[in-house]
Image: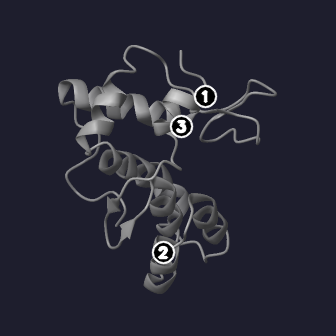
Amino acid sequence: MINQFINEHRFLSNFWYVDIAYDNVYRSVEHFFQAMKTLDEGLRATIAMAGTSSRAKKLGRTVPLRADWDRIKVNVMALGLCKKFSHPELAQKLIATYPHDLIEGNYWGDETWGVNLKTGKGLNYLGKLLVMTRTYLINGTRLLPDKDPIF
């Protein structure tokens, strides 16, 4: 089991810098995810240009949320991960984590995308999506529908 995205597993973090091309080029999955919270193209561009993933996350907390955000946010994350792991070197690193469970263990209390290591509670959506992405890379199982899941 990989229960934290640190050290040799840091590349699993959404804060890992790798270009994600969509309507802009985002510096990380975190940049992409935070930008997709809004339909305002100017705010998306501002988040895309944020100097760090932490700054992108802070900016994402200030944007007006699109009305369908709660319904699509997991698909948005899945799309961001697909784009991240379309980079061959990262794809190979993700495949190399097989057969381990991937748990985004954290001490900042995120019980939606990860597991709070203080309480042991969490839905671990990020870890589950990473495993789904890995499965896709290994045997071609479709992860997302043909239609863009965001719009």
Give the x, y percent position of residue 46. Answer: 51, 79
Q: Amino acid at mark 1?
A: Gln
Rendered location of residue 4, percent (x, y): 61, 28
Please tell me whether residue 16 is drawn above or below residue 117 in the rendered image. below
The span from disc 2 to disc 1 (Cα, nearest Å) is: 27 Å
> Which quarter of the figure has residue 97?
top left
From the viewer's perspective, is the residue at label 3 or at label 1 nearer?
1
Q: Amino acid at mark 3?
A: Tyr
Q: Earlier in the sequence, mark 2 or mark 1?
A: 1
The label nearer to you, 3 versus 2, is: 2
Q: Residue at x 34, y 35 (%)?
A: 133
**Is the residue 40 above or below the residue 127 in the image?**
below
Reading the image, the residue beneath label 2 is: 49
Question: Quick one: SS at disc 3?
Answer: helix
Q: Could you tell me how far apart the alpha carbons at marks 3 and 2 are, in whole angstroms?
A: 26 Å
- Name the element at disc 2: loop
Looking at the rendered structure, the kind of residue marked 2 is: Met
Q: Residue at x 36, y 31 (%)?
A: 132
- Tell me the number on the disc at residue 125: 3
Cα–Cα gap, marks 3 and 1: 14 Å
Outermost residue, right direction? 118
**In this rendering, would 56 be left or right of 71?**
right
Q: Counting residues from the N terminus, which is met first, the one under dot 3 or under dot 2? A: 2
